[in-house]
Amino acid sequence: MAERKMDKEMTFAVLPVVYFTPETKWVFGVGGVSTFNLDSISTTYESQLTAGLAYSLRNQFLSYVSGRIFSPKNRSLWYGEMGWYDYVFFYFGQGMNVNQDSEEIYSAKFPRLRFNYVRNIGKNWFLGGGFRFDGMNIFELQEDGALANGEIIGSQGGRNSGLGPLILHDSRNNQLYPESGVYFEAGLQAFGGIFGGEFSYVRAISDFRKILPLGKNQVFAAQAFSEITFGDVPFFALPMLGGNKLLRGLFEGKYREKNLFALQAEYRYKFLPRWGIVAFGGTGNAFSSENPLHFNLTKITYGVGGRFQLNQEKKLNLRLDLAHSPGEPFQFYFTFGEAF
């Protein structure tokens, strides 16, 4: 990673949380952010912890702690998330041929753990492993819905737990608002009873991002993402398109299947010290042997947005995006940080 400018002293801030996504509607709550350094600022990157409690107008409750912690001299990195959620979800079926009329709503309460540990092996490369756990307690299924008959894997909930190796490369100059550099993460995880889970399958992911400076206050960012699974994947863990990060303009989870690929890019221009605008676009598909890949079903998304920098030193942006995909309703996002 490129050297970053950091305060030697720990910082802590408590902020109101207000945001909007199509999947949650308006969300209100409180959050805290702490930044600190475990060694000299010239040899160790800045660590960050974030915590929050929030409630949405869809009657969803969120509580979480997430962060990234670098050990002295960046020898090790821990990153991940721990939380408990009482959530309302939407299921439309699987594959790219689903439609709005097939929507069904279900509720779930679950703890979530994402823990990753990697060791620096030189030149911005880290090698280690990652652990994932969701304890899904699914309730309030629609009586006439596809999930209620119990034939879909995971429709009765259950523990989903997996472990495996991962490799990470990060040369971005800033994690919240990068203006140059490359991010790459790839991992392979096995799920099943040996790790305390009830579903046996394998998951492989690849996430590549390139940030190119185009001139003063102008940045071009691109991302290529893929997720491939093999085995008995529960429906709630299937790769999904959409949401406020991967292909804005698609309702998160409407298109899901065992395999997924997505490409997206964004042009960012800061025209005042705190204000900026963006234009973005993307494409993606979800498929399996049951729902084969058909390129004519590939989704295209596009949109524009505005940015306001809440903290110029830490470069944390308030994000407002309007996105669309042909054949889909317009989607509106009001949240924090960049999509990728």
Image (tube, helix red, strand yellow):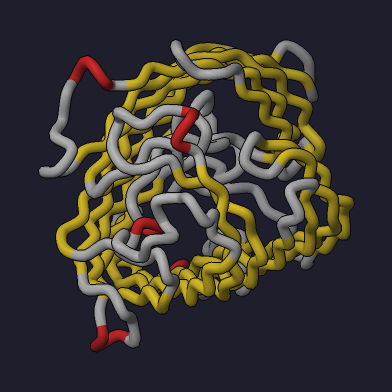
Furthest residue toward front: 144
- In this view, the residue in front, 128 or 282, is 282
Image vertical order of residue 221 relative to residue 206, above or below: above
Percent position (x, y) of residue 64? 67, 67
Asked if residue 27 lies left or right of residue 227, the reply is right
Percent position (x, y) of residue 21? 67, 36
Q: In percent of the image, x 68 and y 53: which residue is there?
A: 6
Percent position (x, y) of residue 323? 57, 18
Q: In percent of the image, x 70 and y 62: which residue is there?
A: 62
Image vertical order of residue 292 relative to residue 69, above or below: above
Write down the quadrant of residue 198 in the picture: bottom left
Image vertical order of residue 142 relative to residue 277, above or below: below
Write down the quadrant of residue 93 in the picture: top left
- In this view, the residue in front, 138 or 286, is 138
Q: In percent of the image, x 60 and y 63: which residue is there?
A: 140
Q: In percent of the image, x 47 and y 35: which residue is there?
A: 242
- In this view, the residue in front, 98 or 340, is 98
Image vertical order of residue 204 relative to residue 27, above or below: below
Q: Is residue 154 among what the camera can see?
A: yes
Write down the quadrant of residue 13 in the picture: bottom right
Percent position (x, y) of residue 200? 21, 73
Q: Is residue 73 among what the camera can see?
A: no
